[in-house]
Amino acid sequence: MKQQYKRVQINPYNIPTQCNECGGNMEYTGLGEYTCEKCHAILYDNYGIVRNYVEEHRGATTAEIAAKTGVNQRQISDMVREGRFEVTEDSKTFLKCYGCGRPIRAGRYCPTCLQLQEARERREEEKKQKKQMTGYSTEVPKGEKGAKRFERGWD
Ligand SMILES: [Zn+2]
Ligand SMILES: [Zn+2]
């Protein structure tokens, strides 16, 4: 990928600004795709390149995608984290759940940990409420807000 040399720093996603064929201006047409105003040649930025590859190679790992497309593996991981597309589980460089380390396809947590995380947040919120309630128990007639929270239950 020698022709990227100039753009690397100012243009980490390698967005095409000029047509390779005729030097015309490239117009963004969506999903990492750019079309030449003059000759209608199509070029892709890194996202477009990776996206195309993944579409044709369902189940490709980030390492594989990086090797085949020349796009930085970290950038690919970022794209996956942003939920732009999915990769498979059979890679060592695969995304890991922040909670349990299990491989995940997108985002930060596996579904289990996401639920746990949410439950924990709720519990902490309730603990806080309880603390406030006991702290003021002699003065405040049973924090109404807290009571309502508990009635709503766990789901
Ligand atoms: Zn052109
Ligand atoms: Zn997990």
Image (cartoon, rainbow, N blue to C red):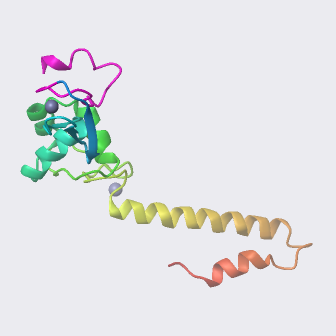
Residue 42 or 56: which is nearer the viewer? 42
Expressed as whole percent of the image width and height from the top left, the position of residue 151 reads: 64, 84
Q: Is residue 128 above or below residue 146?
A: above
**Which region of the structure is painted magenta?**
1-22
Check the image and name the residue furthest to the right. 139
- Looking at the image, which residue is at 79% across and 70% down? 133
Residue 131 can be seen, yes or no: yes
Residue 90 can be seen, yes or no: no
Quarter of the image that includes the N terminus:
top left
Residue 24 placement: quadrant: top left
Magenta region, main secondary structure: loop
- Please indicate whether residue 151 sits to the left or right of residue 147 in the image: left
- Please indicate whether residue 20 sits to the left or right of residue 106 in the image: left
Residue 144 placement: quadrant: bottom right
Q: Is residue 134 above or below residue 44?
A: below
The quadrant of the picture showing ligand 1 is: top left
Q: Is residue 127 above or below residue 146?
A: above
Q: Is residue 12 magenta?
A: yes
